[in-house]
């Protein structure tokens, strides 16, 4: 892998982390000292992806803006890496008229047709959607691909199995990426899943797969590269499983009492400082450049926060516009 690609992966991860930290800061405004999920400028649930940046950076480095990507309820990292407009995405999170869905979707329902991105709070919902997009690309005869990112809890859903079945049967240009952060909300895999391996489940449908350990951004990049090229060559679907890390709670406000013994070790497994040390040790990055990358990311994020706060809320008489049921 060349230096430019490695530094680009690092910048993408830093940009995502700067965004998630800023959203976390803004989310808690008005919700303390006693946590009230409905209070503050960003009410409702908030699922942040700190620690899972390698998945977004490694996958999206291979996708074009005309490729399709679907995300789960924890979507910010892959949305940003795929090129969703940060300002409009932030405005959507704040529920403002200038948001991607005019402030009516919230952070779990981001929709950006200009880069073929969508996500949903429904577990595994993005997989059949990606299959439909991949079917359209195949019928048009293009080399576009579709990718769906889901959590490991989704592998027990019907949508997972139905999507794998049709993707294999119709040889669709689709890549399924499973983010295995060990926890389905507060439930460990050992309490919910009889076969831990998502790649083995894929093979049962004739879909080749790889598991990437250690939350390695370069490992994700290499595995996703092989899968995307396979899809572009019309050779059918692939499944990539990434053992990643959820640095924070399932949702903000989650006390994580179910995870107490594990949390002490979590900061030491943060993928961004780990990758930064690697790049510095290999002479590809120095502290001054690392600080500049972080400062640029923070500047962009704070501009997006200001844009959101300065945008108007949707007018009450437009409550039924831009929605469907």
Image (cartoon, rainbow, N blue to C red):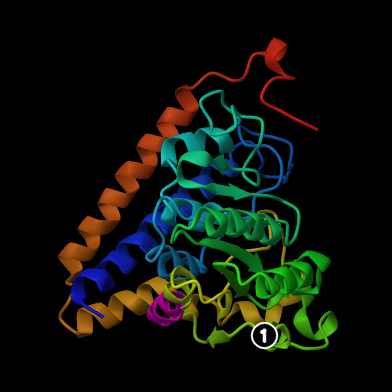
Residue 161 is situated, as x and y percent measured from the top left of the image, at 77, 72
Residue 57 is situated, as x and y percent measured from the top left of the image, at 41, 66
Q: Compared with residue 199, is residue 284 higher up or lower down, i.e. above or below?
A: above
Q: Is residue 58 visible?
A: yes
Residue in the image at 53% along x and 31% along y:
99
Q: Secondary structure at mark 1?
A: loop
Near mark 1 (Cα within 10 A), the count class, few <14, some 14-19 or many ≥20, is some
Q: Quadrant of the C terminus?
A: top right
Q: Nearer the viewer, residue 270 or 265?
A: 270
Q: Nearer the viewer, residue 164 or 282?
A: 164
The image quarter in which residue 172 lies: bottom right
Q: Is residue 202 left or right of residue 92?
A: right
The image quarter in which residue 158 lies: bottom right
Q: Compared with residue 60, is residue 277 higher up or lower down, i.e. above or below?
A: below
Q: Badge 1 is on which residue?
A: 206
Residue 41 is situated, as x and y percent measured from the top left of the image, at 61, 32
Q: Is residue 215 left or right of residue 11?
A: right
Residue in the image at 49% along x and 27% along y:
309
| Membership of 219 in magenta stretch | yes
Residue in the image at 40% along x and 51% along y:
65
Chief secondary structure of the magenta portion: helix
Q: Compared with residue 226, is residue 25 higher up or lower down, i.e. above or below?
A: above
Q: Nearer the viewer, residue 2 or 171?
A: 171
Residue in the image at 55% along x and 86% along y:
210
Q: Quadrant of the N terminus?
A: bottom left
- Count up the numbered dots: 1
Q: Is residue 48 visible?
A: no
Magenta residues, as a range? 217-226
């Amino acid at each position: 892998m060349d230096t430019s690609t490695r530094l680009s992966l690092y910048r993408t991860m830093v940009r995502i982390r700067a965004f998630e930290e800023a959203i976390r800061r803004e989310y808690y405004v008005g919700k303390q000292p006693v946590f009230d999920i409905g209070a503050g400028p960003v009410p409702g649930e908030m699922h942040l992806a700190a620690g899972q940046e390698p998945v977004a950076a490694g996958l999206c480095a291979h996708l074009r803006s005309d490729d399709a990507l679907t995300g789960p309820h924890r979507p910010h990292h892959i949305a940003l890496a795929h090129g969703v407009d940060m300002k409009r995405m932030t405005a959507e999170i704040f529920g403002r008229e200038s948001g991607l869905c005019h402030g009516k979707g919230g952070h779990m329902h981001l929709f950006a047709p200009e880069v073929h991105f969508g996500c949903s709070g429904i577990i595994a919902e993005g997989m059949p959607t990606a299959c439909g997009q991949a079917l359209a690309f195949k019928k048009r005869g293009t080399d576009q691909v579709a990718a769906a990112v889901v959590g490991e809890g989704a592998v027990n859903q019907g949508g997972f199995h139905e999507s794998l079945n049709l993707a294999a049967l119709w040889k669709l240009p689709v890549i399924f990426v499973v983010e295995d952060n060990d926890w389905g909300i507060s439930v460990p895999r050992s309490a919910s899943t009889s076969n831990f391996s998502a790649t083995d489940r894929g093979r049962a449908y004739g879909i080749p797969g790889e598991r990437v350990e250690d939350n390695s951004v370069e490992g994700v990049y290499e595995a996703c590269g092989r899968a995307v090229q396979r899809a572009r060559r019309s050779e059918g679907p692939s499944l990539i499983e990434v053992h990643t890390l959820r640095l924070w709670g399932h949702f903000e406000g989650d006390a994580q009492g179910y995870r107490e013994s594990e949390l002490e070790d979590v900061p030491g497994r943060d993928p961004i400082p780990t990758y930064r040390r690697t790049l510095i040790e290999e002479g590809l990055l120095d502290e001054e450049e690392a600080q500049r990358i972080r400062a640029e990311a923070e500047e962009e994020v704070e501009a997006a926060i200001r844009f959101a706060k300065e945008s108007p809320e949707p007018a009450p008489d437009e409550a039924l516009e831009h929605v469907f049921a």
